Image: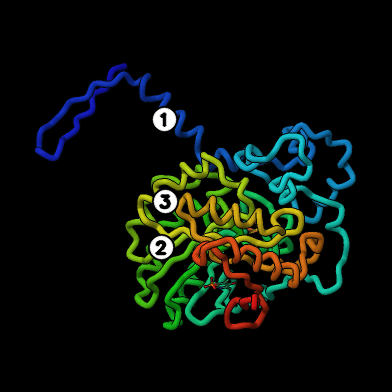
């Protein structure tokens, strides 16, 4: 079937374009099949399958798989693609692989290390004076084993529009809030339509002028950077910023770099926060490489977090003294603007606590 499209150019001239429908359909098809929703549907939730994809024999690791009961396994394919085949110690695999150490009860580790579950308004954390953090979506595309929200009761806490409205009413009532931070889970689990609605509501609150999105989605599912999302972030009257979460240089591949391009072109500031994790990125060389790789693609290192003491993840923890030594070594090899701030979150403090490197 032949269809005719009429285009008018800026000179007012009309151009008729005749296209064979069968030429367009495959293109539409390809777009649908490359969607982030498809990537989400295809996440790997079986550790056996994950290991088989990496040419690792699952039967040597069966004892570890029951840790799924504590926190489900979820790994998107684009993230698996960047793992080194045959290497059980791959730094990306280690972030998602369930381990029987997760059953160990460790003293000083809690289910809610940041005391986030006593918030007055469900889905909103207003711990810092002028910045309020909104739990836009509780779930994530990936389940990182070290996540401090691994014990978060996701089902009971799934925000809906009513809950968003309560959070918005709180923000409107608190004139000191000048920045809204979209967090989660992962806020980019929300659809572009829902984000458009939410941002439009925030734009109406005159004392809010900055919007920050804390997300790991673009790293693990690069297709999430849709044209609609870029359009939304560039046309909003709020000053929009994205803070990514990358822990290791191997998480950066060409798909991710290409997906970020429209955000770079649109001059959306891109920052990154990492978590210091034992046997994953706990050496200066790895973190220096990460900072340099990020700078090449327009991402500025922001925070390097000391591990939050969440129960079931003590095997990722490194002590503060070692962290300080790693940070000092990094500082000696990085320009100041590529050095992330080493911080720890202490419940009840007015801001993140910087660790003294003197
Ligand atoms: C980390 C955090 C923020 C943001 O802090 P910045 O230092 O501005 O990045 C805001 N609210 C909460 C609850 C946080 O945990
Ligand atoms: S992406 Fe962030 S919030 Fe989600 S599981 Fe990983 S660390 Fe937790």
The quadrant in which residue 151 appears is bottom right
**Percent position of residue 229, x then y:** 42, 51
Left or right of 19 on screen, residue 324: right
- The residue that mark 2 highlights is 240
Query: Vertically, is 165 above or below 248?
Result: below
Residue 201 horizontal/vertical position (percent): 39, 66
N-terminal label among 3 and 1 = 1
Look at the numbered disc 3 and give the secondary structure of its residue.
helix
Residue identified by numbered label 1: 28
User: 314 or 211, which is in the foreground?
Assistant: 314
Instruction: Calculate the distance from the C-alpha at mark 3 to the C-alpha at mark 2.
Output: 12 Å
- From what the image shows, is residue 20 above or below residue 74? above
Q: Quadrant of the C terminus?
A: bottom right
| Dots 3, 1 in contact, CB < 8 A | no
Is 158 left, or right, of 282 in this rendering? left
Disc number for residue 229: 3
Residue drawn where x is 69% and y is 75% of the image: 115
* Mark 1 element type: helix
Q: Position of residue 225 (x, y in %)?
A: 46, 47
For the residue pair 32 and 92, the one nearer the viewer reads as: 92
**Residue drawn at (54%, 53%), measured in percent from left and top?**
292
Crowding at mark 1 (Cα within 10 Å: few <14, some 14-19, many 20+) = few
| Neighbourhood count class around disc 2 (C-alpha, 10 Å): few under 14, some 14–19, many 20 upward | many
Residue appearing at x 50%, y 35% in the figure: 34
Mark seen at residue 341 = none
Pointer 2 or 1: first along the chain: 1
Q: Percent from the top left, x then y, of residue 339?
A: 56, 65
Can you say which quadrant of the picture contains the N terminus?
top left
Q: Secondary structure at mark 2?
A: strand
């Amino acid at each position: 079937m032949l269809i005719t499209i009429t285009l008018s150019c800026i000179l007012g001239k009309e151009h008729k374009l005749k296209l064979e429908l069968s030429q367009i359909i495959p293109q539409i098809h390809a777009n649908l099949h490359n969607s982030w929703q498809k990537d989400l549907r295809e996440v790997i939730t079986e550790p056996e399958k994950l290991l088989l994809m990496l040419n690792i024999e699952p039967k040597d690791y069966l004892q570890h798989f029951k840790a799924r009961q504590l926190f489900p396994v979820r790994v998107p394919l684009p993230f698996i693609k960047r793992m080194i085949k045959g290497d059980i110690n791959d730094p990306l695999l280690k972030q998602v692989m369930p381990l029987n150490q997760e059953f160990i009860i460790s003293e000083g580790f809690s289910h809610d290390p940041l005391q986030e579950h006593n918030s007055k308004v469900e889905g909103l954390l207003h711990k810092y004076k002028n910045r309020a953090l909104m739990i836009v979506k509780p779930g994530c595309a990936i389940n990182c084993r070290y996540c401090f929200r691994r014990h978060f009761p996701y089902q009971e806490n799934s925000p809906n529009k009513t809950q968003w409205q309560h959070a918005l009413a709180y923000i409107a009532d608190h004139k000191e809030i000048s920045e809204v931070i979209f967090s989660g889970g992962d806020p980019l689990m929300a659809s572009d339509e829902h984000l458009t609605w939410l941002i439009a509501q925030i734009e109406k609150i005159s004392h809010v002028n900055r919007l920050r999105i804390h997300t790991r989605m673009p790293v693990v599912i690069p297709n999430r950077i849709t044209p609609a999302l870029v359009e939304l972030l560039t046309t909003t009257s709020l000053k929009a910023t994205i803070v990514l979460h990358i822990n290791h240089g191997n998480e950066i591949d060409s798909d991710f770099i290409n997906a970020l391009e429209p955000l770079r072109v649109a001059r959306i500031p891109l920052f990154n926060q990492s978590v210091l994790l034992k046997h994953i990125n706990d050496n200066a060389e790895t973190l220096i490489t990460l900072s340099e790789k990020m700078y090449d693609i327009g991402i500025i290192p922001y925070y390097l977090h000391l591990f939050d003491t969440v129960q079931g993840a003590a095997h990722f923890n490194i002590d503060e003294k070692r962290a300080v030594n790693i940070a000092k070594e990094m500082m000696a090899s990085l320009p100041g603007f590529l050095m992330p701030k080493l911080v720890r979150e202490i419940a009840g403090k007015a801001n993140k606590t910087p660790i003294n490197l003197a």
